[in-house]
Amino acid sequence: MEFLKKWFSNPKNVRIATIAFLTIVFSIIAFLCVNLFLFYKKEVKSDGVDLIYEFGPNTIPLTFDSSIVSDISEQFLSYGVSYGIDVSEWQGGIDWEKVRATGISFAMIRCGFRQTHGNEVIEDGQFRQNIEGATKAGLRVGVYFFGTAKNREEALEEAEFTVNLIKDYNLSYPVVYDIESFDEGRLSRVSYSTITDNILTFTETVGSYGYETMVYSYHDALSYMLDTGKLEGKLIWLAHWGERTNYKGNYNMWQYTSTGRVDGIIGNVDLNVSYFTYVNSENEIVPNPKYVSPPSLYFNNVEETVKTVRTTTMRTGPTTDMPNKLGTIPRGTVLTRTGISDNYSLVNYNGRMVYVLNGDLIKVTS
């Protein structure tokens, strides 16, 4: 203490200490300002994925650039990360060339909807302009239908309405059933089980036309309302806004904000991360760096005739946790089953051995 008193009694030392103190204070202030700026820009990481809330011209690199040369249901699904938006008439007119210049690589476009407090099925007012503009600009495009079907008949109506809208366009991303209205409006007295069945009716009907299908809903609905066991094998588009998600189920696309800003769009827009893309051969499949091979599954050898009870997904392996989707097998297709485990069957389809869920097959008896 005596040393400090003596040291500070010298005016020169006081000046040095003051300068050092102010330097530290200003350094702390500068550090906080930089971090506040980054927070304002909202550039964060979640599970190793950069979540960028603002897309100006050329702010991110293009992740994938392979072209689609055949029906999308026959393409393999591959892990990867790419950024996209979903839009409807609420975004108004969009400059799709500017959107493409930002590095956004895909767009999910609302094609239509059913009213939540009425019965009418309506085409989105900007659907044709959006899908034609996005396609012309070179983005990959998928569509979504906002559904409120109360029963199987209405789900079929929504599916047929969607197919008639999209049949003249080339899609390179899925056709999505958007279900987010529960316990309100026309669905206020419809059980969650029935809503799940209606989702299956829509996706299987649309899938029978050769389209890849997907289910969109929010965190709590997927966690506690929908019967996700029935949705086994379906692509899932999760809506959970924030810097990270704690959703425990499988999902293939994540809508992480509703307040994104993208050059070419006035106002806010939903932003998404897609963990798949379409490729033209197995050689192009990009492994998921976090993927761990599943344990070996025991298959009983059998030799029997089975038939698909619905449009079913075929895979290169008995799991949904890897990029192994080969496309779909139509409902009513007769197959030879050569192996069976607790959940999957090994069947011969057009000369190739593939895996399908046991629940999608029934044994044909002579």
Image: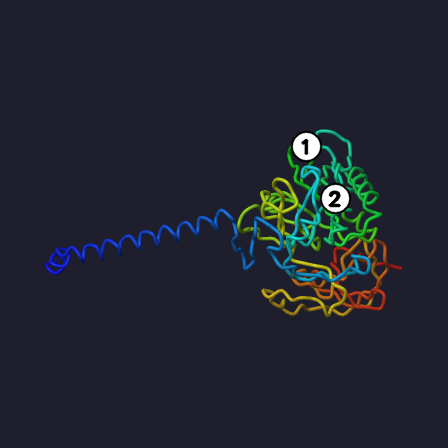
Snapshot quadrant of residue 336: bottom right
The label shown at residue 130 is 2
For the N terminus, which image quadrant?
bottom left
The label shown at residue 63 is none
The location of residue 300, given as percent across then percent down, is 73, 68
The location of residue 223, given as percent across then percent down, is 60, 47
* C-alpha separation, residue under disc 2 versus residue under disc 1: 35 Å
Residue 57 is left or right of residue 121, and the answer is: left
* Foreground pick, 147 / 32: 32
Residue at image coords 62%, 52%: 57
* Foreground pick, 177 / 257: 257
The location of residue 248, given as percent across then percent down, is 57, 53
Tell me which label, 2 or 1, sits earlier in the chain.
2
Label 1 neighbour load within 10 Å: few <14, some 14-19, many 20+: few
The location of residue 87, given as percent across then percent down, is 68, 43
Of the residues shown, which amino acid type is indicated by label 1? Arg
For the C terminus, which image quadrant?
bottom right
The label shown at residue 189 is 1
Farthest right residue? 366
Can you say whether 88 is above or below 84 in the image? above
- Mark in the foreground, 2 or 1: 2
Residue at image coords 66%, 63%: 322
* Foreground pick, 209 / 143: 143
Can you say whether 173 is above or below 220 in the image? below
Farthest top residue? 118
Q: Secondary structure at mark 1?
A: loop
Of the residues shown, which amino acid type is indicated by label 2? Asn
* Foreground pick, 95 / 74: 95
Q: Secondary structure at mark 2?
A: helix
Colour pattern of the rendering: rainbow
